[in-house]
Image (spheres, rainbow, N blue to C red):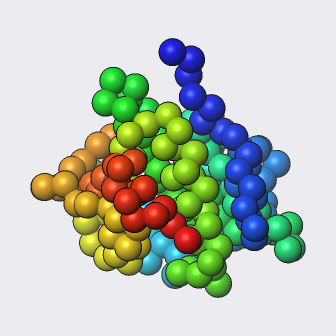
Amino acid sequence: MPQPDFQPTLTGDSVVIRPIAPGDWPELFAAASDPEIWKLHPASTRYTEPVFREYFDNAIASHMAFVFVERASGALIGSSRYHGYDAEKSEVEIGWTFIVRDHWGGATNREVKRLMLDHAFTFVDTVIFWVGETNWRSQRAVEKIGGVKREGTFVRGATGSAPHVVFELTKARYREGGGLV
C-alpha cells in the first residue's frame, strides 16, 4: 500500500491549509507570539523565539506539518501537523495545533478541523489527539468534535515529560456525527 499524502493542500471556504515552508518562519512566529495562546499548553513558553524555533524546525523536519492561511487576507493564522502514522492500527495523530485567538471557537477553527479530519479519514480509521493534562480548553474542543478520552495519562519523548491525555475519534463516530459543520 502506498504511503498516504501527509502534506496535501486542503482548501475550505475561509482557509487554505498548505504544507509549512521555511519561509513561513517570520509570519508564523508573529502569529504564535501571543502568550495567551500557550497559557494552558504544556509548552507554555512557546510564544518565545527559542521555544517556537524548535517547534517550527521540528514541523519542517516532520514532512507532515501545515500552516493555516486565511483566504480573505492571505495571513498565516496557525499551524498543525499529522504525527505517528501507524498503518497497522490504522491510526494517525493530529496535533501541535495552534490558531490565533481571533479565530478560536469560530467557523475558521471548525473548518480547519473538518478539513484535516476529512483528509485523515481517507487513510485511517482512527485519529488521536494528545492534549496536555491541564489544558482544559483543548480537551473541551476535542470533546466537542466527538473525541473520547482514553484511560490514564501518557508521556512521550516527542512532547517532553508533561503528562497528557489522549483522545480518539473513529471514522465511524465522526461520520455518525455528520462530520464538522
Query: Is 9 in front, or is 73?
Result: 9
Q: Nearer the viewer, residue 17 or 123?
A: 123
- Image check: 10 left or right of 96? right
Q: Give above or below for 67 relative to 138.
A: above
Side (left or right) of 111 relative to 178? right
Give the quadrant of residue 29: bottom right
- Residue 35: percent from left, percent from top: 54, 78
Residue 90 in view here: yes
At x 40%, y 25%, the residue is 87
Tell me where residue 112 sits by quadrant: bottom right
Residue reaching furthest right?
Answer: 73
Q: Classify the position of the C terminus by image quarter.
A: bottom right
Residue 55: percent from left, percent from top: 56, 51
- Looking at the rendered structure, the number of numbered marks drawn on it comes to 0
Instruction: Please give the name of the residue rendered at 29% of the width and 43% of the height, measured from the top-left corner.
Output: 156
- Spot the residue most to the top: 1
